[in-house]
Image (cartoon, helix red, strand yellow):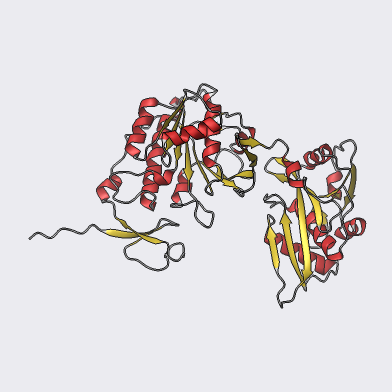
Amino acid sequence: MKQLKRPKTVYVCQKCGSACPRWVGRCPECGEWGTLVEEVATPQEQKTKPFLGGDKPIPITQVKNLTTARLVTGIQEFDRIMGGGIVVGSTILIGGDPGIGKSTIVLQISHKLTQSNLKVLYISAEESVYQSKLRAERLQIDSDNLLIASETNIEVISAYIEEYKPDFVIIDSIQMVYRTEIPTAPGTVTQVRESAMALVYLCKRKGISLMLIGHVTKEGALAGPRTLEHMVDTVLYFEGDRFQSFRILRAVKNRFGSTNEIGIFEMKNEGLEEVANPSELFIAQADRKATGTVIVPALIGTRPLLIEIQALTSRSYYATPSRRVSGIDFNRMAMILAVLERRLGVPLGSQDVFVNAVGGVKVDEPAADLAVAIAVLSSYKNKPVQDGTLLLGEIGLSGEIRPVNHINNRLQESARLGFKKIVIPADNNKRLLKPEGITIISSSSLQNVVEMML
């Protein structure tokens, strides 16, 4: 009796994508525990077989320029993140928690593109076409240029792309798509990697923009192999509490734009709506007379936003005091606390210190150092900062206040929102365009600012 050959299996890490011939508790590549999953090894001849035929090499002088370099959606918050629009032929990967609004925003992007006479192919791998139709009706989307199909087979999806020749393709989501020649379940590392690679290769060869929606792990990272983020051009994260109305779209990788940009949206019954004035969102509920509260004109990407910085100090009952931050770089806060204790003699070694940037935004630039320092001192001394005063500046290790960039843009945003006084570094007085109705106080010493504000 002929004995059947058992298919060879490998153990693939769900975090980094590395493979092991046998199961081990800890991945030898990334060091994570319990991430190895058994998968059937793909035959070597199938791995090396090309999925689609490619174009032959040609001189770069014969490459034809595109008539339209970017697809402008008209959603300003999204276009700003993308660097002015979606680059033709690029691949975008967007991830976020379940229910955060990923499918909603891609449908709204599709609607805007169809209004510019562009053809969009929406592949709904998780929902039926009827479920997607219900969402489209809620968002008031009705266009013949928006083609929708419910499919998970990569060969069928590729055939749709070849037949209908769309300008923009959306896959919702890539974890549900599979290739029939790979004997593993959809969502595994091999399936996600090979399916995404086939779609990216096809769309780039055809000059079609592609958007992939991805799941996230319980740690908040994109599920699937790390190579998935390497093979795409842009990686976007949709952040926010699904029980709250505001959402933040953040770029963590962008080959054609800045990675410091964020887009702010508000979820309503009609879909996601752009927040026209984000500064008012971050300071709308600020109590100007509360201790430990300071507002800083921070630069997020290319635009200034007024961010409220909150600090709280309390007596520590443990040998090692607690240090907690949210939205602020922990190492910079530790440096600021050391400067306050060493240069100003403030005994913070016995205090628990908590610092928070309100609104879920991340402020990682040194220009917020002065605001963090004054907020901590305001809470420690239980004295509020002067009402309507903004603080801006980088703190050096000797207690000096160093200059910041784009000072004029920050001043204009501060004056537009009605603030009357701002403290800036003394070295920023050069080439300063003073807005009307705002008082500028310049200082080069942290000690002087503390004496003025507190």
Point 81% across, 53% down: residue: 294
- The spot of residue 333 in percent (x, y) is 73, 61
Query: Which residue is more in the foreground, 49 or 400?
Result: 49
Is residue 155 found left or right of 426 in the rendered image?
left
Residue 111 appears left or right of 275: left
Establish if 395 lies above or below 252. Answer: below
Location of residue 271 with respect to 287 vertically, above or below: above
x%, y% of residue 167?
46, 27
Q: Quadrant of the C terminus?
A: bottom right
Q: Position of residue 194 (x, y in %)?
A: 36, 46
Q: Is residue 357 left or right of residue 401?
A: left
- Report if residue 379 is visible in the image: yes
Tell me if residue 403 can be seen: no
The answer to which of 96 and 338 lies nearer the viewer is 96
Taking the spot 90% from the left edge, 56% from the top edge, the residue there is 453
Q: Position of residue 26 (x, y in %)?
A: 42, 67
Left/right placement of residue 256 relative to residue 314 reads: left
Residue sitting nearer the eye, 385 or 402:
385
What is the quadrant of the N terminus in the image? Answer: bottom left
Question: Residue at the spot x=50%, y=31% of the render?
Answer: 88
Q: Where is residue 201, by image quadrant?
A: top left
Going 34% across and 31% down the picture, which residue do you hit? 159
Q: In the rendered view, tell whether residue 396 sits above or below residue 285.
A: below
Which residue lies most toward the left here? Answer: 1
Q: How many marks?
A: 0
- Judging depth in this view, the residue of 69 and 362 nearest the camera is 362
Task: Examine the image and state in which quarter residue 34 appears.
Answer: bottom left
Task: Give above or below for 63 relative to 324.
Answer: above
